[in-house]
Amino acid sequence: MNNGGAEAAVAPVGGPQPLEWKFSQVFGERTAGEEIQDVDIISAIEFNRTGDHLATGDRGGRVVLFERTDTLDHVGQRRDLEKMDYPINRHPLFRYKTEFQSHEPEFDYLKSLEIEEKINKIRWCQSAYGALSLLSTNDKTIKFWKVQEKQVKKVCDLNVDSTKAMGNGPIVGSSISTSSKQYMANGGCTSNDFSLPNGGLPSLRLPMVTTLETKLMARCRRIYSHAHDYHINSISNNSDGETFISADDLRINLWNLEISNQSFNIVDVKPANMEDLTEVITSAEFHPIHCNMLAYSSSKGSIRLIDMRQSALCDIHIKLFEEQEAPGSRSFFTDIIASISDIKFAKDGRHILSRDYLTLKLWDINMDSGPVATFQVHEYLRPKLCDLYENDSIFDKFECCLSGDGLRVATGSYSNLFRVFGCSEGSKKATTLEANKNPMRRQGLTASRPSRSLGSPSGVVRRGKGADNSAVDANGNTFDFTTKLLHLAWHPTENSIACAASNSLYMYYA
């Protein structure tokens, strides 16, 4: 391996070139023995459309914004990347921009339910007039934020010296002479005549407004609430720039960004009798190009593509994507590990990437017979599903992401590992990276070939004999279930990945 490590794939002629992943920077790096507060753990990551800004949300309800600095000129103006003369291996850099408290803990008195402040999702909106706009949501409430620079102004040059006025001191620039003060002190009765000071009355000074500094201010423009009975798991912006959807376990609602007191229910899977409930909605995403289409996934491992032009309530899908179960492979854990935790559209809208507990699947929206590729993420855990069920790790929700060119996909795993797979026929192996300053330190996982069948896993093999919070792969590497990389995002135009390991934000580039 070269310094930083090359992707463990030898691309054929015409295939994607191998990538050499390198550490870029880290924010909030932990020190040895440092105790991590639960409110500081990152729970959401999102790049904006241009990739010049990055937002993270945490369990404490805060949103932190970062901005890219290697595309700024000497006066802070952003330059056009296509016109910039950079060396081949230029180093993308971000810096802290600002942060704000998006959500506070609440209590629903009608349902006797505590509502956590944790940020579940962040989505960037179209920017206007130099302001940054984004949506953030916790379990129940969505908020629309606008962040922009505001000039902090102060009124100065007053006629009253504020420092002396507080202590009842004399008035600055007073036009009242000593005799007039005595005259008023005596209630207007004095033998001395009222006299003006030499030179007459001084003129009054008009207060002046001066600009002290420019600060970034976050302002909540709208609050979208009281529309979900269950926890919100997804929000997604429409390509029309005017609407967005929010999804919970049983319903998907359509909102207009300008109207916060009204939404339209477009998907409802709640049965008349809750005892008949067999699946729930786990994720929902708008099509990146067609404003009338969206997809949502379920706990049964299926993805439904719907067209909002068909009816007001989209209870009939136009495409259903699901993989047929292999005969004789069903077990107690089949439905649990089949549940899809995240879906993402490719930038061109042709493919959908889905993540279940053990695999990544890539789907072609024009072919609903099965996924075009299946990637084994941590197949070595299959023999350990019973232990994972007992410690609830089997219910962990891992996110997934695609590169802007659609040639690669990535998702997280345990021990703060994440894996990058090539999507083309030439990419036969995957790169395993660890969220630290030496990402190629653990090249232990045997890479897997994209496959159409879950019945032919590669790299599986023996079960670890350690404690219940660890597993061992084919190469003898131990994996810790208590450290998991759930959230990551791929830069929209470059091979750069941001991922969250507990309270730390790591960034890598290739």
Image (tube, helix red, strand yellow):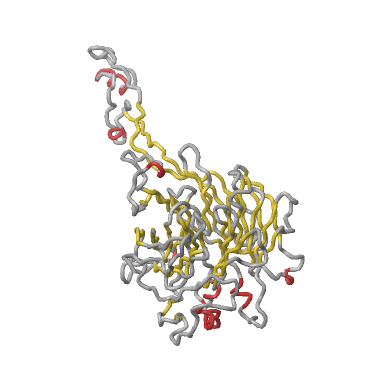
Quick one: 44 or 170, which is closer to the camera?
44
Locate residue 115 relative to residue 39 in the image: left or right.
Answer: right
Q: Camera-side residue: 11 or 420?
A: 11
| 320 left or right, relative to 60 | right
Which picture quadrant has residue 456?
bottom right
Residue 402 at what x, y percent from top left?
Answer: 51, 59
Answer above or below: position of 207 versus 295.
above
Quarter that holds the C terminus: bottom left
Q: Residue furthest bottom?
A: 465
Locate residue 183 relative to residue 308 in the image: left or right: left
Q: Residue furthest front?
A: 13
Image position of 259 with respect to 158: above or below: below
Q: Residue 413 location, x and y as percent?
A: 47, 71
Task: Give the mark count.
Answer: 0
* Whether residue 219 is visible: no
Percent position (x, y) of residue 152? 38, 37
Regarding residue 354, the answer to whether it shows in the image is yes
Q: Looking at the image, which is closer to me, 243 or 203?
A: 243
Instruction: Decide if residue 347 is on the left or right side of residue 54.
Output: right
Residue lying at the far right in this picture: please name it. Answer: 272
Identify the residue at horizontal 66%, vertical 83% (top origin): 328
Residue at 31% across, 67% down: 31
Query: Height in image: 451 above or below 169?
Result: below
Instruction: Tell me which corner region of the image, top left, top right, bottom left or bottom right, holds residue 27.
Output: bottom left
Which is more toward the observer, 477 or 110? Answer: 477
The quarter of the picture where the N terminus appears is bottom left
* Residue 375 on image: x %, y %: 53, 70
